[in-house]
Image (cartoon, rainbow, N blue to C red):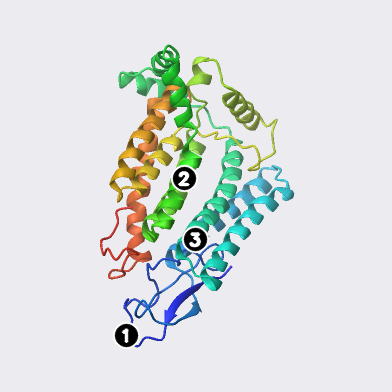
Amino acid sequence: MILNRWKTNAVAPVCPVSSESTSVAGALGRSKCGGIRQDGDAGSDRRLRWELTRDCRIKVLLIATVLLTDTLIVIGLGLHFPLGDLVRPLAITALLCSVAVFYHHFRPVPKFVLCTAALAQIVAFSSCFSVLMYAVATTAQPLVDGSLVAVDKWLGVDVRHAVVWASVHPILQGLLEIAYNLLLPQTALVVIILGFKEDRRSLESFVLAFMLAALLTTIIFVVLPAAGPFAYHGFEASQSQERYLEHFNALRSGERILVTWRDAEGIITFPSFHTAWAILLTLALRRYRVLFAFSIVLNTAVIISTMTTGWHYLSDVLGGILICLIAVPLVHRLSRWSYPQGTPSPSGDQRQLSM
């Protein structure tokens, strides 16, 4: 899908960079997103021109690469992906892109364009990523839980103590379990907040960092898979953990060849993508003091809950932090190309953001 960029009949443009502006509404492009440039005075008449932003080119390339990798692994390893499972993610992505086109082309509302564009990118990527996560689990490399426990012990931490401590504080345990499951709602909320504030650069950077962190996590998972503390130590499993173990063990043993986004569980425990995701959500709001402070508190609880629920070792959490230490600077480097120097941000702030 192609989305346009704004241009006016003004002789002197506000932004001297002709190809890549950070004006809002430039969140969509030829496949999933597009680019917009706003020139001239605020009251000028507007006309539309087609263009694809640099940020979008990176995301389309990442999604296409994951999709191609999925296809090669599924064919190469004799796995099964039901073609019917393409319908829902394609339909949702198409719907979101259509809404973005409408609010860009026919009834210009930049904040709606930003929100729907980001959600379309996340849906398209996450669908492909879920298939990749399940497909690479079938490689069945030796589990490294013993090594992770040893690292935790060296650091003076035993996750079993965290689980027992939580169990004797049922109210706190319940709150931490709720926090653990709030990443998806948080993601939708962050997209809406940044979109409605027309903070295009922060929103686009968050989505790109999310994609890169997920891919980095998967690469490590292929080489260093782990079952997780609750499986290694034999804790009583929750329903979600039981489903995870069923899928994880069946993929590794070859009993399951079905790989799809439908009913998928997060089967990567090391490094902790939950930790990386929570950190990225917090960083996305760092320009807004009250929201940032609230996000720090909430996502600190999320990170703590990864251990009190028995899902992750401390080593997993540290691995998730390391993922962010790689992904965030990488996005910052890419932003120098995506947003050329001198390009204004939606708020008029000329500062280069760090994510």
Find numbered disc 2 in the image and state the secondary structure of the residue it sits on. helix
Tell me the residue at 60%/30% (across/down): 248
Q: Amino acid at mark 1?
A: Ala
Residue 12: which numbered mark, if any? 1
Between marks 3 and 1, how big is the CA–CA gap? 28 Å
Between marks 2 and 3, how big is the CA–CA gap? 16 Å
Per the image, the residue denoted by label 2 is 187
Tell me the residue at 74%/49% (across/down): 84
Find numbered disc 1 in the image and state the secondary structure of the residue it sits on. loop
Between marks 2 and 1, how big is the CA–CA gap? 39 Å
Q: Position of residue 177 (x, y in %)?
A: 47, 26
- Earlier in the chain: of badge 3 and badge 1, it is 1
- Earlier in the chain: of badge 2 and badge 1, it is 1
Q: Position of residue 16 (x, y in %)?
A: 31, 78
User: Along the horizontal axis of the image, is 152 left or right of 79?
Assistant: left
Tell me the residue at 57%/68% (across/down): 102
Find numbered disc 3 in the image and state the secondary structure of the residue it sits on. helix
Q: Amino acid at mark 3?
A: Phe
Mark 2 surroundings within 10 Å by alpha-carbon count, few (fewer than 14), some (14 through 19), many (20 or more)? many
